[in-house]
Amino acid sequence: MASVYWHCCYISPCFNKNGVIANTKRKQPVLSYKYYSHRPQHEQNNKPFHEEALEEDGHGHATRSTRRRQIVLQAPLISISLPQLFMSDSNVLALPGNDVPQNFREYTDDVNKFRIFIPQDWQVGAGEPNGFKSITAFYPEEAANSNVTVVITGLGPDFTRMESFGKVEAFADTLVSGLDRSWQRPPGVAAKLIDCKAGFYYIEYTLQNPGESRKHLFSAIGMASNGWYNRLYTVTGQFVEEEAEKYGSRIEKAVSSFKFI
């Protein structure tokens, strides 16, 4: 049977001895999130994370399609949980170059081998929760429900390319149908596969929790190897309906700029 696990994600800013972020009055942030999973046996020995299947095929055998779906779903769920965390800068932020859009700057992660353009005045933070290799978040300094996250997940040996997750035509629908366990799509709104190029799937979808603002999400999902095993990179930008005019185009531009280096 599947179990529901809650994990705490510690996002490490610069704190003083009282647990308050330096030069602010903000308390140390801790993020809790849940996913549906059997606990991986190799979680303790730093092996690639390989999600166990949660359903059976009627004959006592786990279905591989369910395992694929769970891997795809975890990163967007993390992204949805991040709107109001306060995190400090990390890694290298290069000065704008000739190819960087106006009012953006380039963020480069030499360890995880990616770069992305982010709005010039946005903050950066990182964390390493259980089950993920890393999470990097970009968010405006002012309080907002909008952000961009890069979530990296280790994959098992049977995931060798994006097509391992199924046909591209069904990928977007698989993603959002799984999120519908706890989120509701507004009437008439469905996931849409915007593009598939250079090994990335670009997906746009909208979610709404009862009593809350509608969230617009824009994701780029791709795969790369670190030399030992493949990793899934899920870049997700989100903004609420009320902040669409202020952040929408900037978030989509940031997600679209993501590249491996």
Image: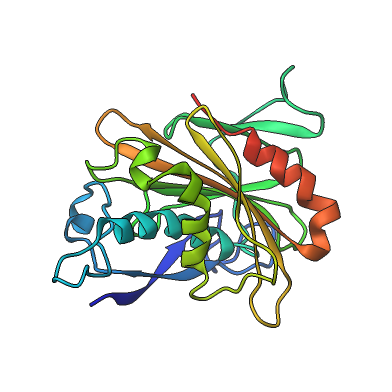
Q: Is 127 on the left or on the right of 16, as rendered?
A: left
- Look at 59% across and 66% down and name the residue there: 20
- Look at 69% across and 72% down and name the residue there: 187
Residue 180, percent across and down? Answer: 52, 71
Residue 243, percent across and down? Answer: 81, 60
Image quarter in which the N terminus is found? bottom left
The image quadrant of residue 230 is top left
- Look at 48% across and 74% down and name the residue there: 181
Q: Tell me the colour scheme of the image.
A: rainbow
Can I make out residue 11 in this image? no
Q: Is 51 on the left or on the right of 19, as rendered?
A: left
User: Which residue extends farthest left?
Assistant: 60
Vertical placement of 132 versus 168: above or below? below
User: Which residue extends farthest bottom?
Assistant: 211
Residue 234, percent across and down? Answer: 49, 46
Looking at the picture, tell me which residue is in the foreground, 61 or 123: 61
- Look at 19% across and 72% down and name the residue there: 58
Vertical placement of 43 versus 225: above or below? below
Can I make out residue 53 in this image? yes
Residue 4, percent across and down? Answer: 34, 76
Vertical placement of 88 versus 120: above or below? below
Looking at the picture, tell me which residue is in the foreground, 54 or 8: 54
Looking at the picture, tell me which residue is in the foreground, 157 or 138: 157
